[in-house]
Amino acid sequence: MAFGNIPLSLRRRGSLIPSPLTFLGLTVAGSLTLPLLYVSYKALTADLAVWHRLWTTRVPELFLNTISLALGVAVGTLVLGISLAWLLTRYRFVGSTLWGWIVILPLAIPSYVLAYIYTYVMGKGGPVESFWQGMFGPDAFFPSPFSYTGAVLVMTLNTFPFVYLLARAALLNFNLSYEEVARATGVTRVSTFFRVSLPLIRPSLIAGLFLALLYVVSDFGAVSLLRYQTFTYAVYQQMTGRYDHTAAACLSLLLVSFAFLFLIAERWSRQRSRFYQTTGQFRRASPQPCSLLSTFLITGYLILVVGAAFGIPVILLIQWTLSAAAEGDVTLRFLEFVWNSVFLSGTTATLALIVGTPLAYLACRRPTRINLLIIQGAYTGYVLPGPVAALALLVLISQTVPVLYGTALVLILAYLVHFLPAGLQAMESALHQVTPNLEEAARSLGSPIYRTFQKVTLPLVRGGFLSAWILVFVQCMKELPATLLLRPVGFDTLAVRIWLEASEELYQLAAPPALLIIMVTAPVVLLLVGKGRQIT
């Protein structure tokens, strides 16, 4: 077909002649999807005997455990997230504004840190068990942390802020007129809450629940320390214990399928949501002042939840860190772990901006079918848990570029595949807030596209891009499974040291790196969430 009579603008908009930027996006997105494609190929071409062995031995147990854990955490996060959001948006009491920030802090604690804290707190001879048996006798039953109950408790305390944040935002933008109409017709407060309020904020609840469940399904650190068998933990065991990459690929494909099912269910539920709030009689809910008794009860509930999710872990970590320092266990080598973590995280975050910028630009400024396909390919890291990405890169690098095997570069690539989507979301959001008219005005004056982006667009999206860099940096600081599998010999990060020491129940030695990670991530979490709160 000849293109001589087609205007240049139509060629570009119709993608008849892909631009160099599109070719670059295809190259990047294709590279990012290689791990997923390899895992799928390896699993689908595996011998049927491998699949039969897994289906008759491991898969039923792993399926039941993973689904049960997801359901248990779903119930817990919904109860905690909705109740906290409701109390902190509908009631005004002493310290309510401060509590609105404090309940976010559990996001700063990695799941494996919370898990190793609770193996001590709830473990045999621990303070909680000793108190329980002192109250009800030495033969009284007390649940072990190395159980389904322990896993649900730890993961719920670690993920409920996802639901809280989105439920809070929805309640702040809630039209109170709907509740008033229901109350005027004689509907009780409880019935109004379940029949009117919850359905109207359902899309936000589902989005928060999706984030929590995706985190739970792909988690490795907490379930490994709690010895709770899930697909992610089983993939790691197949790779490190049995050295069976084929079986690991098969389990990885099942795990990725679970993640895709969660994604599809979330999208389907979002499309099914048909709740719109009119603006004609829009009224925000004003927080109601609380009595002394109500203030006492609400504050007690907040102390219980935040204390279990953040207060107790931080207090114990400080205590153990001081003890470790007094005994001389915090040596200069500790600075090496800090440097390794900061180097890997900073390098990956910077690469994420470099790689993600053209992808975000294509998605926001040139949303053709091929460009949207490119951005979807880049987002495959969302459904690729750490051990799965590590497995694929481990084999791909060893077979194609063996000279890179065992280097920090492979680890950085694994981080990039897994955490680039988090940065892409922030970059896309920032670009969407800048009107294209500014860029078109610069282009009409003869400025090339790269100079327009540098002089016009970049200064306007600098804050959003900085948020993307911070998001990726924080995620990399807490990353564990890929680091365990791909790190060079003798190259330990803070996360690795926590896991190694905690797995041997050396709580005092694991405390300093755990406390440092929290000290780094907590201010960043508050900063990022603060920007979102300003919008609402």
Image (cartoon, rainbow, N blue to C red):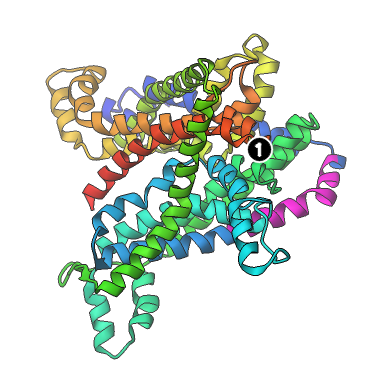
Give residue 103's position: percent from left, percent from top: 37, 53
Q: Which segment did they paint magenta? A: 50-70
Side of 64 where 295 appears, left or right: left
Q: Is residue 61 magenta?
A: yes
Q: Does residue 350 appear anywhere in the picture? A: yes
Q: Residue at x 26, y 53 (%)?
A: 98
Location of the N terminus by quadrant is top left
Side of 472 where 94 appears, left or right: left
> Which secondary structure type mostly characterizes the magenta part of the structure?
helix
Which element carries disc 1, helix, strand or loop? loop
Viewer-side residue, 324 vs 415: 324
Viewer-side residue, 99 vs 189: 99
Q: Residue at x 44, y 30 (%)?
A: 516
Q: Is residue 510 magenta?
A: no
Viewer-side residue, 354 vs 190: 190
Residue type at tag 1 = Glu
Give residue 185's position: percent from left, percent from top: 27, 90
Side of 210 where 427 appears, left or right: left
Give residue 68's position: percent from left, percent from top: 65, 59
Side of 72 where 78 appears, left or right: left
Q: Quadrant of residue 301?
A: bottom left
Q: Residue furthest right?
A: 49
* Circle 1 residue: 505
> Measured along the vertical axis of the image, is residue 194 above or below residue 213?
below
Q: Residue furthest bottom?
A: 186
Q: Does residue 262 appear anywhere in the picture? A: no
